[in-house]
């Protein structure tokens, strides 16, 4: 069985048994050439992949990042893997391969700083950044050592010549693997039924007992959810996170506070002073620009949404975890603000405490090219949903 780097589900094509992959700090290797001779070693690179948002007085900028940086600091070897992780099929790194894995000495904080240099992501003064839906993994580049030459394990090309009086790899050879991949059967903890999952899913649905679950530290935890049903035929339900929070460093407890802070063109009604506030965020990965637009539209609308605790039959996989959605709250607040220069300087000072998170399934109808939500006037291009599966 072959798995992609983003796969979270292992399904046997013979018996149909499915397991959730608990990968921890994921480790992968690039396939090496069978025609090159020499001692095989694997050099580690740290891969950062996700949507990076930056915000300052001028507003919010965004960019999709997929880059690798060398994790050993050996200057005579390539500093990045280029496009190889995006174009080659990755395999899980395991002890069954006759090779020597090399240790990495770089932290993820250092990797992020190094990636910013590689991608030319120098931040402006007084600007701030936030990753959303990011994935971190270690990818091993195969190398062959022939006498004092280091060969590219993929192409066989000579990369460098080792110093005659020094073995660069001796101090960083790994004696044994420090990671493992464990399997969790996708059986409902409540009723034992086979849960509905997708390769990109972070939430698993049980149609038998009408429940939703997510993996937390090696066990499944129940997720609150609600579905807003539609009578329109051929309806597709898209998942969103509805989040209620306590804010620190700012007065933001009601719908009236939200309208005053964002300067939305609405006349505040007296009852809105007690109306609770909720933020909405797509629970699926999509291009940063669309992600921010849809989240801002839903949150700015602040329409009362009531649903049933019943799973829809057709839904898009939940590929963005609730924790990632919470990290987007400040960005959504800035997106909703009309006068952004008034709110951007205070965003870094705001603190958040989650009160309640609900997975909300909203109905969309397919007009052939787009998915449309009639009540909230939200439109999402279907191709963008497909593109988001690669994030």
Image: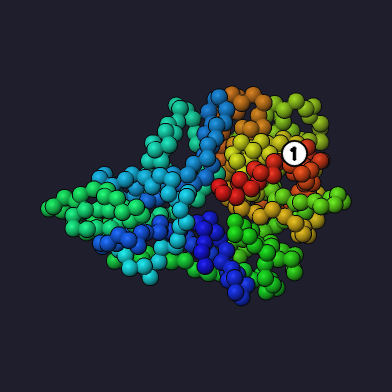
Q: Where is residue 151 in the image (x, y as percent from the top left)?
A: 27, 53
Relative to residue 139, is residue 219 drawn left or right? right
Asked where in the image residue 313 lies, by quadrant, the reply is bottom right
Q: Which class describes the residues within 10 Å of circle 1: few (<14), some (14-19), or many (20+)?
A: some
Farthest residue toward the right?
231
- Residue visible at 64% across and 48% down? 386
Q: Pointer 1: what residue?
A: 378
Is the residue 191 above or below the residue 355 in the image? below
77 or 228: nearer the eye? 77
Colouring scheme, one of rainbow, by chain, secondary structure, one colour: rainbow
Relative to residue 321, is residue 96 drawn left or right? left
- Can see residue 319? yes
251 or 161: nearer the eye? 161
Q: Where is residue 382 in the image (x, y as percent from the top left)?
A: 69, 44
Relative to residue 11, is residue 33 drawn left or right? left
Asked where in the image residue 246 lies, by quadrant, the reply is top right
85 or 22: nearer the eye? 85
Is the residue 194 above or below the residue 139 in the image? below
Per the image, label 1 sits on a secondary structure element best described as strand
- Residue visible at 40% across and 44% down? 82
290 or 41: nearer the eye? 41
Farthest residue toward the front?
35
Is the residue 192 above or below the residue 73 in the image? below
């Amino acid at each position: 069985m072959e798995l992609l780097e983003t796969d979270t589900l292992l399904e046997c094509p013979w018996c149909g048994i499915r397991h959730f992959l608990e990968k921890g700090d994921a480790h992968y290797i690039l396939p090496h050439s069978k025609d090159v001779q020499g001692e095989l070693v694997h050099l580690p690179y740290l891969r950062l992949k996700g949507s990076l948002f930056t915000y300052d007085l001028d507003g919010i900028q965004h960019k999709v990042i997929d880059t690798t940086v060398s994790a050993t600091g050996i200057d005579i070897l390539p500093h990045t893997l280029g496009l190889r992780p995006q174009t080659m099929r990755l395999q899980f790194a395991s002890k069954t391969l006759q090779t020597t894995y090399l240790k990495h000495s770089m932290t993820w904080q250092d990797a992020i700083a190094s990636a910013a240099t590689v991608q030319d992501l120098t931040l402006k003064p007084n600007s701030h950044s936030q990753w959303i839906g990011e994935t971190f993994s270690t990818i091993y580049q195969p190398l062959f050592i022939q006498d004092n030459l280091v060969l590219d394990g993929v192409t066989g090309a000579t990369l460098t010549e080792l110093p005659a009086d020094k073995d660069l790899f001796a101090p960083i050879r790994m004696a044994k693997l420090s990671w493992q991949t464990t399997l969790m059967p996708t059986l409902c903890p409540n009723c034992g039924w086979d849960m509905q999952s997708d390769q990109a899913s972070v939430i698993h649905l049980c149609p038998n007992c009408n429940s939703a679950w997510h993996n937390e530290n090696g066990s499944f935890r129940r997720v609150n959810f609600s579905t807003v049903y539609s009578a329109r035929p051929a309806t597709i339900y898209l998942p969103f996170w509805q989040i209620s929070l306590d804010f620190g460093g700012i007065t933001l407890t009601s719908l009236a506070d939200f309208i005053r802070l964002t300067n939305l063109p609405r006349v505040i009604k007296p009852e809105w002073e007690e109306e609770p506030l909720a933020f909405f965020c797509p629970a699926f990965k999509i291009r940063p620009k669309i992600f921010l637009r849809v989240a801002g539209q839903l949150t700015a609308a602040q329409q009362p949404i009531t649903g049933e605790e019943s799973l829809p039959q057709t839904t898009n996989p939940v590929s963005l975890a609730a924790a990632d959605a919470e990290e987007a709250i400040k960005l959504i607040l800035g997106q909703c603000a009309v006068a952004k220069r008034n709110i951007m300087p205070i965003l870094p000072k705001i603190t958040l405490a989650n009160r309640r998170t609900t997975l909300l399934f909203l109905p969309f109808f397919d007009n052939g090219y787009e998915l449309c939500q009639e009540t909230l006037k939200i439109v999402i291009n279907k191709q963008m949903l497909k593109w988001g599966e690669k994030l």
